[in-house]
Amino acid sequence: MVELLSNNGLEELEKDNAVIHDNDFSYEGYQVVRGEFFAHLFEPSVTLTAEKVSVNAACIRKLPNTDYVQFLVNPTEKKLAVKPCLETAKDSFCWTTLGKDGKRKPKAISCRIFYAKVMNLMGWDPTLRYKILGKLIRTKEDLLFVFDLNCAETYQKSNAEDGKNPRKPIYPNEWKDQFGVPVKEHQDITLVSIFDDYTVFSINKEEENNDETNNNSGYEEESDSDS
């Protein structure tokens, strides 16, 4: 069991009668709610839509000195990596653009052939929009983002005439009558991490606070129209 509170913190709660002791509590019947059901405003993500690919603002902020990257695909494990590189590196391209305020912003990159190949690899519908969350990892030699294409969030356009909520999420049919997987099964799954052997970097709280007024990712991003 992960200890989330220090002994002193737990003692303070007990003094305030904020803790109810229940030795009969059981996780039986509980499901761990899928992360896909929540907004991920500050987590790195990559989006594929309308024959274009782009990362979100979180990726750009995590690598403030990177202007050029390479895309790498593992077709067997169905993973996508975004690796910083020099402008002179073969197959590099610029992943940012400057906004009117002079700040670096993600750049939507046209990629008709790459887009088609990913759609074919994953069996995806090219008319939909796919967003994949990722992690910034450090290997022995490099720092790069890794995205698991198997865990893509899928969105379709709405026919709403007022333009509100133009994108609707699409989830597998088996998710319809459940919130997530049972607690025991979830614990077993988390023992096997796809990011084993790497150091995983998360966005710290200070960065999250700074992002609140500027970030357009997550469900806010889902309401944007295609460029």
Image (spheres, helix red, strand yellow):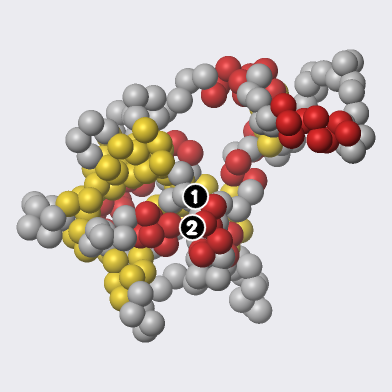
Answer few, some or many: residues within 10 Å of disc 2's Cα (few below 14, many 20 plus, some between 14 and 19): few
Quarter assignment of residue 92: bottom left
Secondary structure of the residue carrying tag 1 is: loop
Near-viewer residue (37 or 171) = 37
> CA gap, disc 1 to disc 2?
5 Å
Name the residue rendered at 7%, 58% in the picture: 88
Viewed as shown, does residue 70 lie left or right of 160?
left
* Contact between labelled residues 2 and 1, with CB atoms less than 8 Å apart: yes
Viewed as shown, does residue 200 lie left or right of 40?
left
Answer few, some or many: residues within 10 Å of disc 1's Cα (few below 14, many 20 plus, some between 14 and 19): few
- Relative vertical location of residue 146 with respect to residue 168 in this rendering, above or below: above
Where is residue 134? Give x, y as percent. Answer: 42, 44
- Relative vertical location of residue 21 with respect to residue 89 in this rendering, above or below: above
- Relative vertical location of residue 177 with respect to residue 102 in this rendering, above or below: above
Where is residue 70? Give x, y as percent. Answer: 21, 50
- Relative vertical location of residue 63 with respect to residue 7 in this rendering, above or below: below
The amino acid beneath tag 2 is Glu
Quarter assignment of residue 124: top left
Near-viewer residue (132 or 145) = 145
Name the residue rendered at 8%, 52% in the picture: 90
* Residue 182 disc label: none
- For label 1, the residue is 204
Where is residue 158? Give x, y as percent. Answer: 60, 65
The amino acid beneath tag 1 is Asn
Quadrant housing the C terminus:
bottom left
Could one spot residue 128 in this view of the protein? no
* Residue 207 disc label: 2
